[in-house]
Image (cartoon, rainbow, N blue to C red):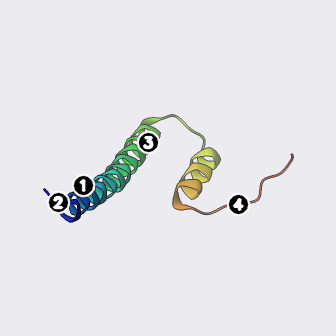
Amino acid sequence: MNIDRLLAFIVVGMTALLIGGIGGLLIGATTEQAALAEILGTADLTADCRAQIEEAMAGGRRPTEGP
């Protein structure tokens, strides 16, 4: 096996690892967020607390009072 072919295998292997790792992170994050949403759906929270959590999960920020 010559060096060019070896380098091609290394590049392809590293690319596959990178793509697989990123895909795994995305799938894991989606699963965790779905599990959190399910837990929050069954939790006994006040309406204000639930609104803050839902807004935070949507990516918005609301100013809070106090430090």
Q: Type of residue at label 2? A: Asn
Mark 1 or mark 3, which has the lower sequence index? 1
Label 2 or label 4, whichever lies nearer to me, is 2
Name the outermost residue toward the right. Answer: 67
Please tell me how crowded label 3 is: few (under 14), some (14-19), or many (20+) other residues with Cα within 10 Å: few
Viewer-proximal residue among 43 and 3:
3
Q: Relative to residue 53, is residue 28 drawn left or right?
A: left
Q: Secondary structure at mark 2?
A: loop
Name the outermost residue toward the left. Answer: 1
Q: Which residue is mark 1?
A: 13
Measure how far apart labels 2 and 4 are at the Cα level.
60 Å
Query: Where is residue 1 shown, x and y percent of the image?
Result: 13, 56
Query: Where is residue 29 shown, x and y percent of the image?
Result: 40, 49
Measure how far apart labels 2 and 3 are at the Cα level.
51 Å
Mark 3 or mark 4, which has the lower sequence index? 3
Q: Relative to residue 30, is residue 1 drawn left or right?
A: left
**Please, is residue 62 above or below residue 33 in the view?**
below
Q: Type of residue at label 4? A: Arg
Q: Type of residue at label 3? A: Leu
Q: Which residue is mark 4?
A: 62
- Residue at (76%, 59%) from the top-left corner? 63
- Location of residue 56 (image quadrant): bottom right
Please tell me how crowded label 2 is: few (under 14), some (14-19), or many (20+) other residues with Cα within 10 Å: few
Which label number is shown at residue 36? 3
- Residue at (58%, 58%) from the top-left corner? 55
Q: Which residue is mark 2?
A: 2
